[in-house]
């Protein structure tokens, strides 16, 4: 029983932490950060281009729009790639002829760079 | 299902607009100030041969609000002089200055679209009239190059079919026979859509096909004859007047037009809404490079992708979108950039100055979403200025409102940007003017704009 209460408390704390982090870090852009974003390698630059062609319209700069904010989603990149490939809810999945495996990994690299920028 | 949370979903427009440049954030090295305020529905600026700022007031806003369209000169000491006044046929949606005269696109809500030439003494001459823009979207532009005035003609409808949404917009009551006109012959798939008959008795039904008047059916294989002028097109006419020519078509609402530094024509296209008889989901606005003679995909493509039978464009719970056309004039090209869904990315200009920076990039004003009227959003979209690298389609925010969330100043309760409608560099290229249309509330019933709340912002590099 004690263990269950601790697990519930931990879960609540995790949810609260995620909400707080998401709330604080959901906006990211050059004016917000007061710093220019510069892709540091070709994979990140390619990932940004592919993101712009496929994802930006619903998640502008990773912020919420038609879709939810991505900037503070704590899920691991492999789960996000799975979601991009297979879709979830109203989000469509992108087939290999739309986004190749390499491009999908480059999007992950771009998103990671954007998250830490 | 989460409710829509658009930036226009504000409680009231009665309070006075607060203006505070400190509430607007820019990248390092840039600064913004408000140089003129209290305009009613401003849409664009231009500069005459003496570099004097001129502001265009639209004379019309969504929400069926008409005022007097005006061209206003702002002298260096701030004095305002009305140079010319139009009639009840707005919106005056765009302006260019060329060789001693102003050229203005008149939207055409009551008499059809026009291209006007306005002399410095205010005399107005009509270069083109009776353009088919009495519907959802209007006559836009213009820009001038190599002796031609280029302008855009928006479509009558959201996706090719006249319906109840057009009645709510207001124009179907005035123009019950108005509909989209293709620029070339098209062959229909024969889709028809049933709605309550809003023009007669809503207990009866109306059945309407594409490119046809309300309550007019179509059949598979039916040919709709193309004609000029047409809907959803870029057109041009000699500066001195003369025969109109088709430049490109298949564009839903080509609002912004600008030539890049190397002379290529780019336009912004406002894309599909989730409304009417044939709603389309998830359709981002587009920045296109225009190639002569090309068809760009409306009403069956979005940003170069087919919308038919694709979950990406199917409104949740409403089934997939079916094609209107049996065959296509050409495969639509790849866009220069795809902007936010419902961002209303409209007026723009190219940087041509190393002093300002980002030479060759497009600075695009985003009016912001019109949710819930046009569909649902989870958070406000647009309400800012973005820069676009047209070489690779990368979009970066340039001027945004301060705060934990993005949105218009009235939604954030700040003194920042409201609804940026166009961006224009001054003749030196060193200063960027951002035209802010002002406050607009949006509900499912329609739009409610606030007269006198427009602002002209000026952005410079420190």
Image: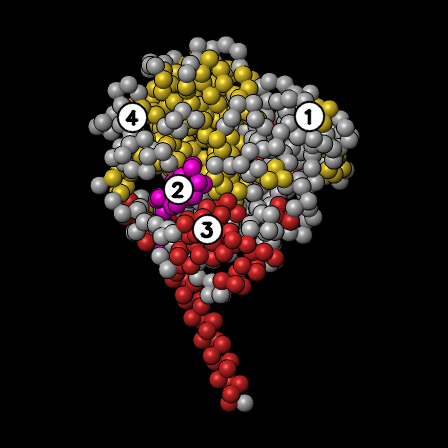
Question: Mark 2, residues whose alpha carbon is within 10 Å: few (<14), some, or many (≥20)?
Answer: many
Chain letter for mark 3, please: A
Q: In terms of sequence position, does the residue under pointer 2 or pointer 4 come before the other?
A: 2
Question: Mark 1, residues whose alpha carbon is within 10 Å: few (<14), some, or many (≥20)?
Answer: many
Task: Please tell me whether residue B378 belongs to the stretch shown in magenta.
Answer: no
| C-alpha distance separating marks 1 and 3 | 39 Å
Q: In terms of sequence position, does the residue under pointer 4 or pointer 1 come before the other?
A: 1
| C-alpha distance separating marks 4 and 1 | 43 Å
Element class at badge 2: strand
Identified at 57% across, 37% down, the residue is B304
Magenta-colored segment: predominant secondary structure: strand
Element class at badge 1: strand
Identified at 36% across, 52% down, the residue is A40
Query: Decide: marks 1, 3 in contact (CB < 8 A)?
Result: no
Query: Decide: marks 4, 1 in contact (CB < 8 A)?
Result: no
Q: Say which quadrant the N terminus of chain B sits in.
A: bottom right
The residue singled out by tag 1 in the image is B186
Question: Bounds of the magenta span?
Answer: B386-403
Q: Position of residue B291 (x, y in %)?
A: 51, 26
How many numbered markers are drawn?
4
The residue singled out by tag 3 in the image is A47
The residue singled out by tag 4 in the image is B427
| C-alpha distance separating marks 2 and 3 | 19 Å
Are labels 1 and 3 on one chain?
Answer: no
Are labels 4 and 3 on one chain?
Answer: no
């Amino acid at each position: 029983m004690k263990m269950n209460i601790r697990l519930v408390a931990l879960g609540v704390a995790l949810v609260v932490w995620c909400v707080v982090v998401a709330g604080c870090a959901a906006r990211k852009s050059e004016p917000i950060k007061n710093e220019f974003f510069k892709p540091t390698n070709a994979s990140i630059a390619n990932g940004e281009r592919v993101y712009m062609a496929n994802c930006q319209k619903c998640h502008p700069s990773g912020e919420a729009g038609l879709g939810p904010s991505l900037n503070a989603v704590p899920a691991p990149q492999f789960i996000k790639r799975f979601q991009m490939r297979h879709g979830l809810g109203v989000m469509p999945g992108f087939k290999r002829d739309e986004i190749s495996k390499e491009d999908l990994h480059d999007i992950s690299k771009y998103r990671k760079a954007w998250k830490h920028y | 299902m989460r409710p829509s949370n658009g930036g226009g979903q504000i409680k009231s427009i009665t309070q006075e607009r607060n203006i505070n440049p400190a509430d607007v954030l820019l990248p390092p090295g840039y600064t913004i100030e408000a140089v003129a305020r209290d305009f009613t529905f401003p849409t664009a600026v231009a500069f005459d041969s003496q570099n004097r700022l001129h502001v265009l007031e639209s004379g019309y806003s969504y929400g069926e609000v008409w005022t007097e369209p005006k061209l206003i000169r702002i002298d260096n000491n701030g004095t305002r002089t009305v140079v010319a006044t139009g009639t009840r046929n707005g919106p005056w949606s765009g302006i260019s200055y060329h060789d001693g005269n102003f050229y203005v696109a008149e939207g055409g809500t009551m008499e059809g679209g026009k291209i006007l030439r306005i002399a410095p003494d205010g005399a107005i001459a009509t270069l083109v009239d009776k353009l088919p823009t009495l519907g959802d979207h209007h006559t836009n532009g213009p820009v001038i190059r190599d002796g031609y005035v280029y302008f855009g003609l928006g479509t009558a409808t959201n996706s090719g079919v006249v319906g109840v949404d057009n009645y709510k917009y207001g124009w179907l009551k005035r123009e019950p026979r108005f509909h989209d006109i293709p620029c070339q012959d098209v062959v229909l798939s024969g889709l028809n859509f049933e709605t309550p008959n809003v023009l007669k008795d809503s207990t009866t039904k109306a059945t309407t096909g594409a490119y046809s008047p309300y309550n007019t059916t179509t059949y598979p294989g039916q040919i709709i004859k193309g004609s000029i002028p047409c809907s959803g097109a870029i057109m041009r006419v000699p500066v001195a007047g003369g025969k109109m020519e088709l430049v490109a078509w298949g564009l839903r609402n080509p609002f912004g037009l600008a030539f890049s530094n190397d002379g290529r024509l780019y336009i912004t296209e406002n894309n599909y809404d989730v409304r009417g008889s044939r709603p389309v989901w998830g359709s981002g606005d587009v920045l296109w490079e225009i190639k002569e003679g090309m068809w760009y995909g409306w009403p069956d493509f979005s940003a170069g992708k087919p919308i038919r039978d694709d979950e990406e464009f199917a409104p949740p719970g409403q089934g997939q979108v079916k094609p209107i056309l049996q065959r296509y004039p050409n495969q639509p090209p790849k866009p220069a950039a795809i902007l936010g869904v419902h961002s209303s990315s409209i007026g723009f200009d190219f940087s041509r100055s190393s002093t300002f920076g980002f030479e060759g990039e497009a600075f695009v004003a985003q009016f912001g979403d019109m949710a819930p009227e046009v569909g649902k959003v989870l958070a406000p979209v647009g309400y800012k200025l973005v820069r676009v690298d047209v070489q690779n389609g990368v979009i970066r925010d340039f001027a945004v409102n301060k705060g934990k969330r993005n949105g218009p100043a009235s939604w954030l309760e700040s003194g920042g940007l409201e609804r940026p409608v166009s961006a224009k560099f001054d003749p030196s290229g060193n200063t960027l003017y951002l035209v802010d249309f002002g406050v607009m509330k949006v509900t499912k019933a329609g739009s409610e704009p606030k007269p006198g709340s427009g602002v002209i912002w000026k952005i410079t590099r420190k």
